Image (cartoon, rainbow, N blue to C red):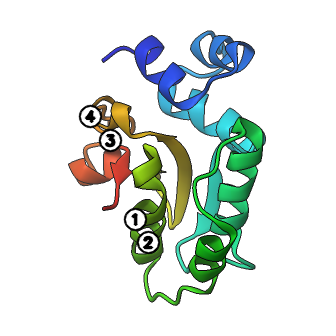
Amino acid sequence: MADEDLVPLIFDDAEDIDMILNDPNESLAYYSMLNPGLATKRFLFLDYKGEVDQEIVNYVLDYEYAYDIELGTADQLEVLGEFGYKYLPEKIREVNKLISPKGYGLFSYPTAGDFYVLFIAELKHVGTLTQVDLLEDEDIPERERHIQLYI
């Protein structure tokens, strides 16, 4: 899959898409998407140890506000915020149980470090989103080089 097909599935702002696809400072799509994703808060950056102050719930609320949709009720989000977990993918799975009936998923963007980069996207693109080797680094296990959806 070409970068120009993948980028619009994650970013919806035409200026962001153009900037990412025509970034003269980055030759890899991985960094062209990662840097503006973090800068614009389209991506949620979490330490591998987990959240601080319900960051995922706040991210979901921000997404709902930005796109004028409801992915979960206030009660569901409150329960999600109090969900205890040992490893972050457990919480991501809980988020996906909540938002997947609305056609959305919380995806994990690949990283080479001890942190998670998460983003929300429509589930209808799951096959396309998860098939691209973004890191192209053979020292990293193949599965870890792809966008993942924990279900």
Residue 52 pos. (x, y %): 71, 79
Q: Earlier in the sequence, mark 4 or mark 1?
A: 1
Q: Are marks 1 and 2 in contact (CB under 8 Å)?
A: yes
For the residue labelled by badge 4, is the local secondary structure a helix, a strand or a loop? helix
- Residue 127 numbered mark, or none: 4
Between residue 27 and residue 52, name the one nearer to us: 52
- On residue 94, the disc is 2
Does 49 appear above or below 42? Answer: below
Q: Position of residue 12 (x, y in %)?
A: 63, 23
- Res. 20 image quadrant: top right
Question: Which residue carries the number 1 mark?
Answer: 97
Q: Nearer the viewer, residue 60 or 146?
A: 60
Alpha carbon separation for disc pair 4 and 3:
21 Å
Q: Is residue 29 above or below residue 95?
A: above
Q: CA distance from mark 1 to mark 3?
A: 31 Å
Q: Nearer the viewer, residue 75 or 144?
A: 75
Q: Nearer the viewer, mark 4 or mark 3?
A: 4
Residue under numbered circle 3? 137
Question: Can see residue 150?
Answer: yes
Against 8, residue 18 (above or below) is: above
Tell me the CA gap for discs 2 and 3: 30 Å
Q: Residue at x 38, y 44 (%)?
A: 147
Check if mark 4's residue and mark 3's residue have beta carbons within 8 Å. Answer: no
